[in-house]
Image (cartoon, grey):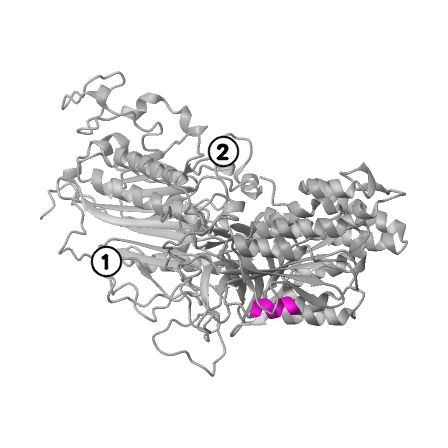
Amino acid sequence: MANFSKSNVPQFSVEVYQNEYLPEGGREVNAIVTVTSTGGGTTGGVPLSGAAVTPARTSGQAPKAAVVIMVDCSGSMDYPPTKMRNARDATAAAIDTLRDGTSFAVVGGTHVAKEVYPGNGRLAVADARTKAQAKEALRALSAGGGTAIGTWLRLTDRLLGAADVDIRHGILLTDGRNEHEAPEDLRAALESCAGRFTCDARGVGTDWEVKEVTAIASALLGTADIVADPAGLAADFTQMMENAMGKEVADVALRLWTPVGVEIRFVKQVAPTVVDLTGRRTEAGPRAGDYPTGSWGDESRDYHVCVQVPRAGIGQEMLASRVSLILPDPSGGAPQTLSQGLVRAVWTEDMAASTSINPQVAHYTGQAELAQVIQQGIDARKSGDFDGATAKLGRAVQLASASGNEDTAKLLSKVVDVVDAATGTVRLKAKVADADEMTLETRSTKTVRVKK
Amino acid sequence: MKMSQKPQETALSKCPGCEEPLEPGDLFCGACGYDLSAVPPAPQDHPTIALAVPVENGAESGAQARAAEVRFDRRAGSDGPDGPDGAAGPDGAAGPGTPGGSGDFELAAPVPAAAPSAAAPAPDPRTPASEPLAATPPAGTRVCVACRAGSVDTDGYCENCGHAQPRERDHMEQELGSVAAVSDRGLRHHRNEDSFAVSTTALPDGSPAVVAIVCDGVSSASRPDEASAAAASAANEALLESLPRGTHPQQAMHEAILAAAEAVNALAQEPGRATEHDRHRHQNAPACTLVGSIMAGGLLVVGWVGDSRVYWVPDDRANPPARLTEDDSWAAQMVAAGLMNEAEAYADERAHAITGWLGADAYELEPHTASFKPDRSGLVVVCTDGLWNYAESAAEMAAAVPADAHQRPLHGAQVLVGHALDGGGHDNVTVALLPFAVEPQGAGSACGTP
């Protein structure tokens, strides 16, 4: 029974957290922009149609989604043989999670991409029969061949591009390095796919390259993670698919308008993970640019915007940036503004006001540094610079502890022995499991929100 | 503290009903039989410290004067040289091009549409000079005062250079017959957190009563601008209600301060009106100072909480001017307690920390009121520290007041604001001027019409 009192179409809200007060001569303005999308369908549920005040999508229908699952079928997937079996089981579990009516396909990936189901360049529409057929087709999956992820992505793009849907999403599983194509081939594939579909990427085992997998997720605005034990794949795939089914609206962009003379230092997503969006800007009219945020369900994300404003005298006030969420019109009309917030600059001689740092800005500045020093520490360790690694990972332990990022602190403690977390005094562990180091590296960008 | 040392009995030195002097211990008024046990507790600092103001025949006989017997010389039709009516009409005071007291403080041009009760926003004197521009936006759109190129968006910012546009409260002026007030953002603050209210009404006997309230928002609290506006308007409305009912002006002032405090307290309970930029820095309850003055029945009543002040400047400058209020401030307390001399106290960085205010976190509200009976004409200057920081002593204030301010109070207020801006304009500046006219001796005791 449809409950028409609850809207299924997400409502977006924008909140700006900043200290707008600058001292005389101050030019840098920082703000944390919290974007929350609410009122969409619950994760994995079937959204209902209903009226909304500012609907992000006006069709009044549940969003039509299409998902392509890319399974690594390279020869290494047979070592150990449980890996291929777990990948099959995980894909089957993901298919079971598909909402009826969702378009889907399964791609087997080696040094070439092959359609496993339904074939002929089409997508199947999920129902009991097609789900059973797809799972039957999975039995034919066998390991053998190399790894060329760019070809998998291009095939997925062709399949999804042919579908008339609102949400396009991919799920990619790999267990090895992208050895059978040049790195620039993968980069080119990512560039051509960016903005056309979103994609979650998973590395199974410990023989894959963290930077390759995180680069795929970052370019295609999805999540990256490690599934060190293949037995955990089914649960992870189910959760990823539920997440994809919860998405309500795609291609939302964060639009920044800035006045004449204001320079953008950076734009980063800072929660739930750190993703630098600065270089992903596309111009959108005079003094405005759009930064992609992908698709949204019921969720909340934080962005850190840093701009440099021109000098102004004490007592002056200006708008440093107008931050809005934009939904492009698929038929090419004017984009819809979902919500907006203002970032301001006010020059004051009140030192207490101008020297205080907004707690949100301070927190996420620390979280971004945490992700950075983990990456630098792991790189230093790999290159044999143990002093450098100790310093960087020590700082990471200190930041994780001070900000209450317990998950990251736990991962760090598997790589270093913590002597004193408050001062960041650590010793590198003599022996570190590959899985632990890769888990730390993959999840280094995960952040926590400000402690309440 | 100074105010609490005063004996309680002085609070009932005269009957609230007929103003007959009372003896300590009286239960009923000997003249009219007023039940004194029914009198609400009057302000403890009631009444009347003479300061340097000459009081006619001493305080006792001054209090005996009945409101009805006092004639105001500014009634309709009177046009005496000392009456404000002649010169202070809406178009008399603010003529364009009238030289102000300072080079860069321009007087506002008169706004023909401005009703006497409407505060007319005036052009912002801080508008930066700008270079000529090639492109002019289409007529009808508001053009940015900073870059003169962009039009102004719905949030009040320029869509080209982003600069905030002057807001209505940045500069406010109001003239109402015999009283005028001017408030300005100053040169160093990004918004005007001062507020004022001026009004005129009549006592039950038909004689006029003139009211001016000036409030200064406490910047370290949240929404100081809303606090000062709420306090000024609540106090003003309370007086407009109580004075025509015949409440004694001093009692009315006491009640008006309590009403203002209540209005400010109510703001603290209001959720969600804080803009997002206030949310993190300011968490404490809105607060403001208040100073008010009432001229009615030949009395001059002042009331205050905080460090906003009232000065008395006699028209005949040969007579000494006076400050009529005692700040609720750290420096004033130090001086009052004899711990420091004035120079030392005001040199301390804590000097301006106020010890009394209106707002939800003021733990004990002590409204101060005092009433005076001037025996000669003069000007009442009601102002925030944005002005008196640049004219602290009564003599300095008197020197800053133009000689013809009692005839042209709006112009006088503009000149005083200009004085503060010339001095640096470090704070919001608000001043209200009330010319107080007294009939020459001999004529005043007559029944009004010769």
Q: Residue at x 63, y 51 (%)?
A: A92
Indicate the position of residue A182 as horizontal and vertical percent values.
79, 71
Indicate the position of residue B100 as horizontal and vertical percent values.
38, 65
Q: Nearer the viewer, residue A302 or A102?
A: A102
Lower position in the chain sequence, tag 2 or tag 1: 1
* Image vertical order of residue A251 relative to residue A241, above or below: below
Give the mark toward the camera: 2 or 1: 1
Give the residue furthest to the bottom: B134
Q: Residue at x 53, y 50 (%)?
A: A299
As helix, strand or loop, the secondary structure at mark 1 comes to loop
Quarter-wise, where is residue A412 in the image? top right
Q: Is residue B386 magenta?
A: no
Q: Is residue A93 left or right of residue A440?
A: left
Quarter-wise, where is residue B324 in the image? top left
As helix, strand or loop, the secondary structure at mark 2 comes to helix
Give the extent of the magenta segment: A155-161
* Image vertical order of residue B33 relative to residue A13, above or below: above
CA–CA distance in space, label 2 to label 1: 40 Å
Indicate the position of residue A329 as horizontal and vertical percent values.
46, 69
The quarter in which the C terminus of chain A is drawn is top right
Q: Is residue A449 left or right of residue B445?
A: right
Chain name for mark 2: B
Chain name for mark 1: B
Indicate the position of residue A120 as horizontal and vertical percent values.
60, 69
* Image vertical order of residue B132 relative to residue A74, above or below: below
* Image vertical order of residue B207 relative to residue A215, above or below: above
Query: What residue type is disc 1 on?
Result: Pro
Residue B116's mark?
Answer: 1
Q: How many labels sit on residues?
A: 2
Q: Nearer the viewer, residue B90 or A139?
A: A139
| Residue matched to label 2 | B333
